[in-house]
Amino acid sequence: MEQRQRRSGSSMQPIRMLLLSDWNLNPMVRLLAEPSHGIAIEAIEGPYNQVHQLLMNLNHPSWREGLDAHLVWTSPETMVPSFKKVLDYEAVNIGQIMQEVDDFCDMLIPSGMNSRFVFVASWSVPPHYRWIQTLTNKHNTGLTNILMQMNLRLAERLSGHKSFIILDSTYWYAAIQKKSYDSKMYALGKIPFTRDLFAFVAQEMKAVVCGLLGQSKKLIICDLDNTLWGGIIGDDGMENIKLGGIDPVGESFKAFQRELKRLASRGILLGISSKNNEQTALEMIEQHPEMILKKADFSALRINWEDKAQNILEIVNELHLGLQSVVFLDDNPIERDRIRQALPGIYVPDLPEDYTQYPVFIHTLNCFETSSVTEEDRDRGKWFQIEQQRQEGKRLVGSLEDWLSSLELKVRVTKLNAALLPRVVQLLNKTNQFNMATRRFTTEDYWTWSNQADHSVFVFEVEDKFGTSGYTGILSLSRMEADQAEIHDFVMSCRVMGKGIEEAMLYYALLAAGSSRLTARCIETSKNKPFIDFMKEKYVPGSTERLDADQIHMPNYITFIEE
């Protein structure tokens, strides 16, 4: 299992996924294989219409070694035979239907041992299917009502198994806004859906996998004029800007800001890069009564007449993020082209020409997927605002050492417990830059790993005079032999980089290892150069694994607290 976790943590190798369905999903194979979102999925088709057989025989050859995920996409009447009575307008027993859902779950759950992620498409009927509208939502009788109960039961039964992820198939049908069912292809080859739908689902699958592997976007950098509001503030003045009110364009910009605010509320950082007079733009942001987003909502600002590519680089470096974590929104196609050419790692979507489509557009972006939303996510914007206060203090203090001492840094270390587990797994799966091995885990798998004999996981919380930065570091160790210990995970959030916290964590690893020799095998990726650079001088000369205790020191300005 550990080997697969390490392999699938890299964006360079395809994710191997088994497709199980009572339909023909062959068109999905090529669409999943096309690289996008930084990954490609190597899809393997299970035998046609043999879902039951494969779920009941986990030794079947289709369950190949090294499988990362499998998708189970089925029709409700096949997996829950009593549901066919609903389609045929026969009397049904809701208790029998729920029992058959439970039977399906009992058959499905063991398959979680054969791959890291199990994607289950929610049950739905073809989008063209019309049942009796006056009865379809009638409790325990109507088709829509029963289908909703089946999906709720499915979610309830799978909720305790963190590797199972239920995907919303009804959203797929609605979102493409095109024909999704192909009756001719179903008659010819049991392929029920159009290419448009398969292409959309393939993109959704890749977006979800990216989120699970910590490769989703973390920062939106916005232009201002005709992006956050209608008009040009320097020419039109605040009184003539279109924002809110009863104007349809103004209402659309306000709704667009509201959607950005919602993204910020779940942990996506916001920044501004705009060619404007800073004082004029900030007056608009702070004083216009219809502004949803205020200065405090943005973690970094670059409002000047400089090249936007340079401004964005400064923002990314300031926030300790990689270019691959950034989305750039600008109404000007020339500026978008400039960023695409100068900073190809950044995702630069085309905004609609019709401003009233902005709120819908932001909803269509699937690059912000995540497996959970924690309190740390909700507070992320606040932490970066506090970091700006810290950096302002740095400019006022003479030396780096004096500044670090003035922060009154405290590091609390706690052994992993069930309450901290979701945050720890999130750090493991989302952190790329300061990550020793880039191992990715489900919650269940990491809890099992951490509870093995001689395994220890320590969680670090950082606090200074401005407040807490939350749980931002992980160290996991195992005692391999009586005189040797090994670090398996050394992970730290980018928001506490550059303050010596990493030195303190490594020093604590020495303390935890006791008199044992300590080893750490760094696995270099395209994204963890900051970690590799930090560790360069930490090894015994000639070794790439054994740490040199003489090169590891506890910063004297940090106070350690064990809990």
Image: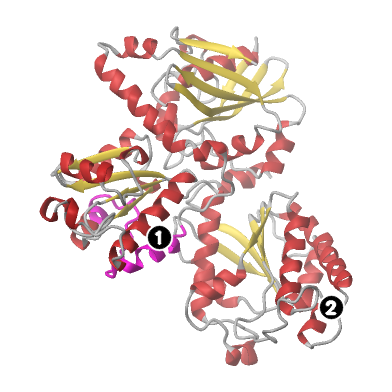
In the image: residue 509, left or right of residue 239: right
Left of 77 or right of it: where is 301?
left
Magenta stretch: give its range: 339-366
Q: Secondary structure at mark 1?
A: helix
Rate crowding at label 1 as few (under 14), some (14 to 19) or many (20 or more) other CA atoms within 10 Å: some
Task: Find numbered disc 2 in the image and state the secondary structure of the residue it sits on.
Answer: loop
Q: Amino acid at mark 2?
A: Ser
Q: Which mark is residue 476?
A: none
Residue situated in front as seen by the camera: 80 or 70: 80
Residue under pointer 1:
362
Q: Quadrant of residue 563?
A: top right
Residue 350 counted in the magenta span = yes
The mark that comes first in sequence, 1 or 2, is 2
Type of amino acid under label 1: Ile
**Residue 532 screen position, x and y as percent:** 43, 30
Q: Residues within 10 Å of mark 2 (few under 14, many from 20)?
A: many
Residue lying at 51% horizontally and 46% vertically, measured from the top left: 214
Contact between labelled residues 2 and 1, with CB atoms less than 8 Å apart: no
Residue 320 in sight here: yes
Task: Identify the residue at horizontal 63%, vertical 54% (top origin).
Answer: 68
Q: Is residue 144 above or below residue 254?
A: below
Q: Residue at x 25, y 11 (%)?
A: 398
Q: Quadrant of the N terminus?
A: top right
Residue 551 in the image, given as x and y percentages of width and height? 46, 12
Give coordinates of residue 138: x percent, y percent. 75, 77
Where in the figure is residue 315, as x and y percent of width and height?
Answer: 29, 39
Give me the C-alpha separation between circle 1 and circle 2: 40 Å
Give yes or no for residue 563 being in the magenta stretch: no
Q: Is residue 538 visible?
A: no
Quarter location, residue 87: bottom right
For label 2, the residue is 82
Q: Nearer the viewer, residue 297 or 393?
A: 297
